Image (cartoon, rainbow, N blue to C red):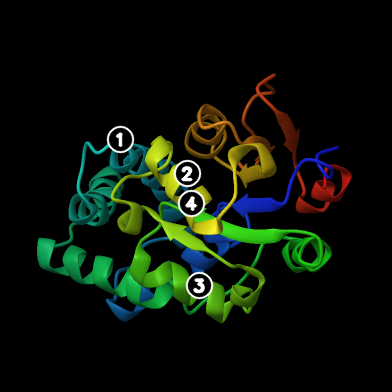
Amino acid sequence: MYSDKVSDVFFDLDHTLWDFERNSALTFEKILAEHNIRVDLPDFLNIYIPINLAFWKLYREERITKAELRYQRLKTVFDEIKYSVSDEIIDQLAIDYIKYLSTYNYLLPNTKEVLDYLKPKYKLHIITNGFQEIQEKKLVNAKIRDFFDQIINSEMAGVKKPNPIIFELALDSANTTSENSIMIGDSLEADILGAKAVGLHTLHFNAHNDPVHEICHMIHDLSEIKSFL
């Protein structure tokens, strides 16, 4: 559908290619045990996942800092489950979480199959709001770094998706145009609306059971990308 128009494919990383929820759960399993924090992991994660998404939204909107994101998402969860943890321990958990997260390398189903399919035909790139110090490690440890030419992150750009500046930086870095590019990501707000505002084609990978919309085509499995490219 887009194959005659597109030369460059831009992907989000977390929740789109890299299995954030699974890798995050394994990280919490490790660090909570190491700090002897006795909570039921599934209960903890049920609370943490929506809280983390909410704090990331605040971070995208420049309403909190990176340090506040890392601390507040954990503090809020422990308060919610009424488990007493010192600020010192929360700070150390935040450090350990970032330290170990990129050591787990599960990808979402069909990631490598789709990248193998796309790589001979298109230039592939990443645009991510994730922290610079771990996004590269995620790609390397998951053995997908070599698929991508440009890795653009929000710290490098000085702004976060959906700010147009990060998409413009990505296009400039890839030496391409919005008309010849498509953005594939899980966040309707950050990836899809952000990219469309700059003129990119878009494909929404619905990782969070978002409601159906008319903004662009929606897929539920990465293998469906083959129908469009």
Residue 220, given in percent of the width and then of the height, sits at: 75, 42
Asked whether residue 29 appears in the rendered view, the answer is no
**Of pointers 3 and 4, the one earlier in the residue sequence:** 3
Residue 99, compared with residue 28, is above or below; it is below
Q: Residues at badges 2 and 1 in contact (C-beta under 8 Å)?
A: no
**Of pointers 4 and 1, the one earlier in the residue sequence:** 1
| Distance in Å between CA atoms under marks 2 and 4 | 9 Å
**Residue 167 badge:** 2
Residue type indicated by callout 3: Lys
Q: Looking at the image, which residue is at 65% across and 66% down?
A: 107
**Of pointers 2 and 4, the one earlier in the residue sequence:** 2
Instruction: Give 79 or 97, whichever is nearer the viewer.
Output: 97
Instruction: Give 117 or 5, whichever is nearer the viewer.
Output: 5
**Residue 172 badge:** 4
Q: Nearer the viewer, mark 2 or mark 1?
A: 2
Residue type indicated by callout 4: Asp
Residue type indicated by callout 1: Glu
Asked whether residue 141 appears in the rendered view, the answer is yes
Would you call the spot at circle 1 few (<14 residues within 10 Å), some (14-19), or many (20 or more)?
Answer: some
